[in-house]
């Protein structure tokens, strides 16, 4: 009999499996169960919990065996808080999803009972009292590094941000404004002075995701994202944190002025998500991108035609995501602007033409490629991608409605034709290219409803 494989080899192999596949493996025998529960395989996993009374002692033992420290929870009753503290005392991240109730300040005060807590998120809920009370704020002042609040109706957004400004070690802040006061749909932008005080207080902040539902009656000021330096009053010097990543969510062109980003010279990543565009309004993207010549990552979701801002895409970009209609002419225009592009994420529809045939000639340095197909499947031109000598991973995705339609017709995704193309592509690339066709799992800690694309 050959000697068994060492545990570290099994763990390495299991690292390529998805969550459901690992659960299937651990059901085989006790040995594989112990290996599949190795903490290294679950380090970045977030478990979703609801109605904590139904979980057994064995369930909690499994979570502790895996070393899980990140959870997403729905509404917790008082006794359920006690269960969470008892069974998972070393939690580092908690996100509350789909509360569906009206909460008061004391609800979150239980968070102070987790000594290792660093990451807190709140989604889809209503508070009729301040969310961050004085006691909780004092407990988390030095500890909290990540805070995300999305689709939460607050009694006063200004008060919440003033409280958040005391969390001096925040490095990640997501705030997608829903509206002030219970029962009102009026969206009032956070006043410039309040926003500037927030940025000046959070010196460690590197990532900011700022969103707003609705459109305020007046545009924001030119220096809204550029707080002045209090040590040099009157001088045009940036006094905020050295942001490296900025995400603007649901901002129509009329809100932010042309030179809103000119002071953010430290940015390395920019994401702009449009909910809609208004005809007759000039696109601001060229003005926003012009001073950001150091960008490494750029993502544009929706908005105007590519031709409007193609010439201003910085040549330093190595990661590019475009969720807009793309033609072969657009690709020809983009390629000279990003000669070092290594990661590309695009959509292909019936008007896009043979993009797969052109990509190897336009972007020869690609290492990863992600294509979302709309109202069509990959065709034979997919085989041209084997000419990308540096390509290591290819993701092929289609619409959920497309998958559901084929499933109901007895043809699960990927179809037999697509599977055959994938096998041929692997042979042509000598198994160098890993092809992924499964939908990516959602990260509840980082992907709220505003940014989740459903793939």
Image: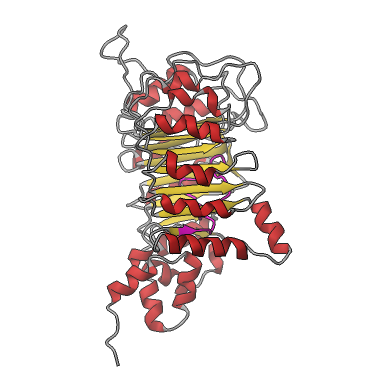
Q: How is the image coloured?
A: secondary structure
28 over 158 or under it: above or below: below
Residue 441 among magenta residues: yes
Residue 418 among magenta residues: no
Q: Residue at x 33, y 23 (%)?
A: 265
State which quarter of the image contains the N terminus.
bottom left
Could you say which is closer to the camera, residue 135 or residue 69?
Answer: 69
Instruction: Report whether residue 106 is seen.
Output: no
The secondary structure making up most of the magenta span is loop
Q: Which residues are magenta?
A: 435-455
338 over 140 or under it: above or below: above
Could you say which is closer to the camera, residue 18 or residue 211?
Answer: 18
Residue 6: quadrant of the picture: bottom left
Q: For the view shown, which residue lies furthest in the bottom direction? A: 1
Q: Position of residue 311 (x, y in %)?
A: 45, 23
Instruction: Report whether residue 384 is seen.
Output: yes
| Drawn side of residue 428 relative to residue 451, left or right | left
Q: For the view shown, which residue lies furthest in the top direction? A: 234
Residue 232: quadrant of the picture: top left
């Amino acid at each position: 009999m050959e000697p068994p494989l060492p545990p570290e080899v099994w763990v390495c192999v299991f690292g390529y499996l998805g969550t459901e596949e690992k659960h299937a493996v651990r059901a085989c025998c006790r040995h594989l169960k112990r290996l599949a529960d190795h903490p290294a395989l679950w380090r970045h996993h977030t478990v979703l919990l609801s109605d904590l009374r139904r979980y057994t002692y064995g369930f909690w033992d499994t979570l502790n065996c895996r070393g899980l420290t990140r959870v997403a929870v729905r509404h917790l009753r008082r006794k359920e808080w006690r269960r969470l503290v008892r069974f998972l005392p070393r939690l580092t991240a908690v996100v509350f999803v789909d509360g569906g109730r009206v909460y008061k300040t004391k609800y979150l005060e239980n968070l102070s009972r987790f000594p290792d807590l660093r990451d807190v998120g709140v989604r889809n809920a209503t508070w009729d009292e301040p969310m961050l009370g004085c006691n909780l704020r004092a407990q988390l002042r030095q500890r909290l590094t990540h805070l995300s609040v999305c689709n939460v109706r607050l009694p006063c957004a200004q008060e919440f941000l003033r409280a958040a400004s005391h969390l001096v070690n925040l490095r990640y802040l997501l705030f997608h404004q829903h509206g002030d006061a219970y029962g009102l749909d009026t969206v009032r932008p956070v006043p410039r002075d309040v926003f500037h005080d927030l940025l000046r207080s959070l010196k460690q902040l590197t990532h900011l995701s700022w969103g707003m539902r609705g459109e305020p009656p007046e545009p924001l000021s030119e220096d809204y994202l550029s707080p002045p330096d209090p040590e040099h009053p009157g001088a045009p010097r940036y006094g905020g944190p050295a942001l490296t990543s900025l995400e603007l969510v649901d901002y129509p062109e009329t809100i932010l002025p042309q030179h809103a980003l000119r002071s953010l010279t430290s940015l390395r990543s920019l994401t702009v998500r449009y909910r809609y565009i208004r005809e007759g309004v000039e696109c601001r993207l060229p003005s926003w991108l012009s001073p950001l010549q150091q960008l490494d990552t750029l993502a544009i979701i929706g908005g105007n035609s590519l031709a409007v801002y193609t010439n201003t895409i910085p040549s330093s970009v190595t990661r590019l995501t475009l969720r807009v209609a793309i033609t072969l002419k657009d690709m020809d225009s983009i390629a000279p602007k990003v000669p070092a592009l290594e990661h590309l994420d695009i959509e292909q529809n019936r008007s896009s033409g043979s993009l797969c045939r052109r990509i190897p000639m336009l972007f020869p340095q690609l290492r990863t490629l992600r294509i979302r197909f709309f109202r069509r499947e990959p065709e034979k031109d997919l085989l041209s991608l084997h000419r990308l000598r540096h390509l290591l991973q290819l993701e092929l995705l289609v619409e959920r409605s497309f998958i559901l339609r084929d499933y109901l017709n007895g043809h699960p995704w990927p179809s037999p034709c697509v599977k055959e193309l994938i096998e041929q592509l692997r042979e042509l690339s000598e198994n160098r290219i890993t092809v992924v066709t499964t939908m990516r799992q959602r990260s509840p800690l980082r992907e709220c409803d505003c940014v989740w694309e459903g793939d």
